């Protein structure tokens, strides 16, 4: 199997019986165990994926080779720190840790940059949210969100996010949700009361169109997962995560699934190794960034959550007059 010519564009291979990546260039073939080249487990596939994406840009889209290398290359290599050991123990963080650090840095840099962009563009934004408010109330929850997305989304097994073909979709996703505010029919929410009282025919048309696009990607991911023998495992993950995230809240009329929440819930499952899956996963993280940057990490239970916390903590401002 010539792994460098397959382009990784949805063309699937029998991953239970491929040649090793380094054997493809030498002409020799070998038969590793199926586990060693499982799509979630084989670290060596990362460079193969990078080569396939570079070849696609160079040979099919006719990008000059230096430009193709720039687009698919990392600004800061994941393996930038040497594997230095002292008394048999590693001194520097592993490449997986470096990928996580880069993901954190890019995320919070984009939150700051997108907030400034939206404000300067006079688009809808929560003007009361300040940097001090963010650090005090939202920074730690956002750190946890980022860790969840990084782990459940299997980003520690992928290349770092500081490459053009992953960073650009992230920026696009971060801008896209604010651009939608220019469409009057979409200036509403997914809250149950809003759906019943505020959604217009145009809102339903846009929402159904978006749902159809999402459904198409879901089918594509399911087909690829089935061919690679991981479909049932991914379905179990999706159902388990969705139930844990939604079931405790769904019965409340105050439940408001903000788009930062939906971006995490959907994006962590778009985690296959194909270029379009990785780009879509980056796009969904950009949608999360937009929600945090523009509105802050508002709670999913709205005023009910605020009321409960005020009562439970016996806040000084929560007296009989305030209740009325």
Image (spheres, rainbow, N blue to C red):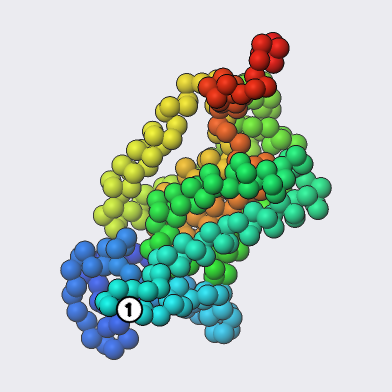
Q: Residue at x 46, y 78 (%)?
A: 80
Find residue 120 and report its horizontal and vertical position in percent. Answer: 81, 53
- The quadrant holding residue 322 is top right
Can residue 50 be seen in the rendering of this structure?
no
Q: Residue at x 38, y 33 (%)?
A: 243
Q: Determine which residue is flagged by label 1.
A: 85
Position of 189 relative to 285 (above/below): above
* Residue 228 percent location from the top left of the image: 29, 58
Say whether residue 105 is visible: yes
Measuring from the top left, give residue 79's x and y in whole percent: 43, 76
In the rendered image, the vertical position of residue 146 relative to residue 244, given as above or below: below
In this rendering, is residue 207 above or below 98? above
* Of residues 180 and 60, the one drawn nearer to the viewer in this rendering: 180
Can you name the residue that lies furthest to the front here?
Answer: 316
**In the image, what residue occupies the spot 36% across and 79% down?**
83
What is the total number of numbered labels drawn onto the structure image?
1
At 29% across and 56% down in the image, what residue appears? Answer: 227
Residue 261 position in % (x across, y down)? 53, 40
Q: Does 85 sit left or right of 134 as displayed?
A: left
Q: Secondary structure at mark 1?
A: strand
């Amino acid at each position: 199997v010539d792994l460098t010519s397959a382009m990784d564009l949805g063309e699937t291979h029998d991953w239970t019986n491929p040649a090793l990546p380094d054997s493809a260039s030498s002409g020799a073939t070998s038969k590793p165990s199926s586990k060693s080249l499982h799509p979630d487990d084989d670290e060596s596939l990362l460079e193969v994926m990078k080569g396939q994406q570079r070849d696609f840009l160079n040979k099919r889209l006719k990008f000059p080779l230096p430009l193709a290398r720039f687009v698919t290359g990392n600004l800061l290599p994941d393996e930038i720190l040497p594997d230095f050991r002292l008394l048999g123990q590693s001194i520097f963080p592993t490449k997986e840790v470096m990928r996580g650090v880069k993901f954190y840095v890019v995320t919070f840099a984009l939150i700051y940059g997108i907030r400034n962009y939206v404000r300067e563009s006079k688009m809808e934004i929560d003007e009361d949210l300040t940097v001090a408010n963010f650090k005090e109330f939202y920074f730690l929850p956002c750190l946890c969100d980022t860790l969840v997305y990084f782990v459940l989304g299997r980003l520690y097994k992928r290349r770092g996010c500081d490459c053009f073909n992953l960073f650009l979709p992230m920026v696009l996703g971060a801008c896209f949700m604010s651009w939608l505010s220019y469409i009057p029919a979409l200036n509403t929410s997914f809250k149950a009361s809003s759906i019943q009282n505020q959604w217009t025919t145009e809102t339903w048309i846009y929402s159904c169109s978006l749902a159809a696009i999402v459904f198409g990607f879901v089918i594509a991911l399911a087909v690829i997962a089935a061919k690679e023998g991981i479909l049932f495992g991914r379905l179990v993950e999706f159902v388990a995560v969705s139930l844990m995230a939604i079931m405790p809240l769904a019965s409340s009329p105050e439940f408001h699934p903000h788009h930062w929440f939906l971006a995490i819930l959907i994006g962590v499952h778009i985690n296959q190794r194909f270029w379009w899956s990785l780009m879509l996963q980056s796009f969904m993280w950009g949608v999360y960034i937009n929600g945090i940057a523009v509105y802050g990490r508002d709670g999913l239970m709205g005023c009910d959550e605020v009321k409960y916390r005020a009562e439970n903590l016996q806040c000084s401002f929560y007296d009989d007059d305030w209740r009325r």
